[in-house]
Image (cartoon, grey):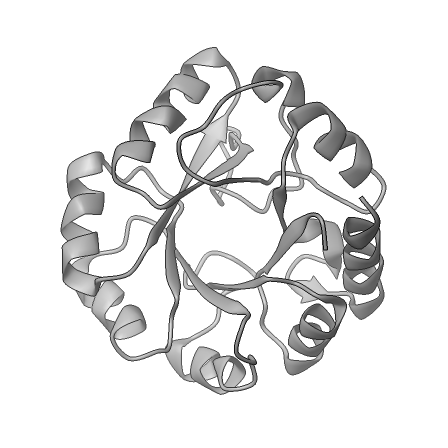
Amino acid sequence: MSIDVKICGINSAEALDAAVKGGATMLGFVFFPPSPRCVTPVEAHALMALVPDGVQKVALMVNPDDLDVGAVCRKLPVDILQLHGSESLDRISDIKAKVGLPIMKAVGIAGPDDIKRAHEYEAICERILLDAKAPKDAKLPGGNALSFDWDLIRGETWVKPWMLAGGLTPQNLAEAVKISGAKAVDVSSGVEDRPGHKSVQKIQDFLKLAKSL
């Protein structure tokens, strides 16, 4: 696959199986109760047991406290911790020291200042995820089916590996990759038939297209 794909918000064995068979390189598990994609540690443990070697298991958390981080990262076979809140560099450093895992920091993008802020996280995080900035009244920091202006990152140079997220679908993936230059993408709502319910067909379609790019 020329474009690496992370299917985020995995909460069923059917979606997991479709993602793995389709060639996804990462699977995201959401530990944020307001999200319709949220799973409990017990549910995640059962699902993660189905993930084969070579596919990375990503735990998504939003401004987690130490207790929550420990419950997820010390008790589950997590490969990467994705922080999707307003975590500061100091807080990320603290979390990283506690869990000993690579960190992927999600940054909401709406303008040039957000690009600058995203670069600041490269100093401490192993990967950056560029997502559409959530509206002020949004209940979720991501997974809102919104895209940002991909021209903002056209030709941008990054020190660390990065992923493109935000409103990606089988219909706009090719254009998003062409404009942004992304070599890795993250999709969640774009492969659902309703919030929190992954569509096996849409997962298959998205991954098939990613293989062809």
Asked whether 80 or 36 is in front, the reply is 80
- Residue drawn where x is 51% and y is 15% of the image: 111
Q: Is residue 190 left or right of residue 140?
A: right
Residue 194 image point, x, y percent: 74, 58
* Residue 128 in which image quadrant: top left
Q: Quadrant of the N terminus?
A: bottom right
Q: Quadrant of the C terminus?
A: top right
- Residue drawn where x is 76% and y is 62% of the image: 203
Q: Measured along the vertical axis of the image, is residue 206 above or below residue 200?
A: above
Q: Is residue 49 left or right of residue 167?
A: left
Q: Measured along the vertical axis of the image, is residue 93 above or below residue 46?
A: above
> Which residue is outermost to the top?
112
Asked whether 69 or 27 is in front, the reply is 27
Asked whether 58 or 38 is in front, the reply is 58
Q: Is residue 156 left or right of residue 90?
A: right
Total number of numbered labels?
A: 0
Q: Measured along the vertical axis of the image, is residue 213 above or below residue 205?
A: above
Residue 191 image point, x, y percent: 74, 56
- Residue drawn where x is 21% and y is 69% of the image: 70
Residue 54 image point, x, y percent: 54, 72
Residue 51 image point, x, y percent: 55, 79
Please say whether residue 136 is visible from this viewpoint.
no
Please say whether residue 128 is visible from this viewpoint.
yes
